[in-house]
Amino acid sequence: MTRTLEWKVGLELVEEDGRTKAVAHLDTGTSTLTGRGSARCNPADVDVPAIGDELAAGRAMKDLAAQLMREANREMEAVGAGTVPQHTGPGYGWPEAVS
């Protein structure tokens, strides 16, 4: 069985007073999820807005991904399947650094 879907992800970033907030929206066509993330510039650091954007966006997407995994686990349990093992280390980075 072949199936093709298109899920849309939108990302909004707002920067104000050294703080960047991000909201990521996932629309699957049948449901929506919203992830949130933020970043702030340490007053002692040089203000590089792109870094705040990347951090806040990455955190919002990570939040969104965690919600999606929790939903998949709930649905798997509902049909009697086992769940995906939980990862104990960081969810990103080089594999050698995580082990």
Image (cartoon, rainbow, N blue to C red):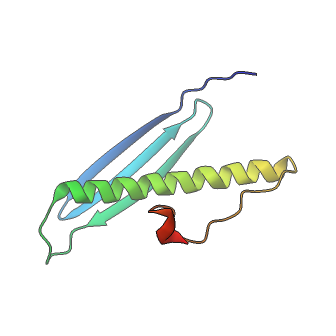
Residue 90 is at least partly visible in this image: no
Expressed as whole percent of the image width and height from the top left, the position of residue 82 reads 82, 55
Q: Residue furthest bottom?
A: 44
Expressed as whole percent of the image width and height from the top left, the position of residue 21 reads 31, 57
Residue 11 is at least partly visible in this image: yes
Expressed as whole percent of the image width and height from the top left, the position of residue 29 reads 58, 29
Q: In percent of the image, x 60 and y 37: which residue is there?
A: 31
Count numbered badges in the picture: 0
Image quarter hosting the C terminus:
bottom right
Query: Quick check: 19 above or below 45?
Result: above
Q: In percent of the image, x 25 and y 59: which residue is there?
A: 52
Image quarter hosting the N terminus:
top right
Judging depth in this view, the residue of 85 and 67 nearest the camera is 85
Q: In percent of the image, x 72 and y 53: which residue is there?
A: 73
Query: Quick check: 27 above or below 38?
Result: above
Q: In percent of the image, x 85 and y 46: which residue is there?
A: 79
The image quarter in which residue 40 lies: bottom left
Judging depth in this view, the residue of 32 and 5 nearest the camera is 5
Expressed as whole percent of the image width and height from the top left, the position of residue 91 reads 51, 62
Q: Residue furthest right?
A: 80
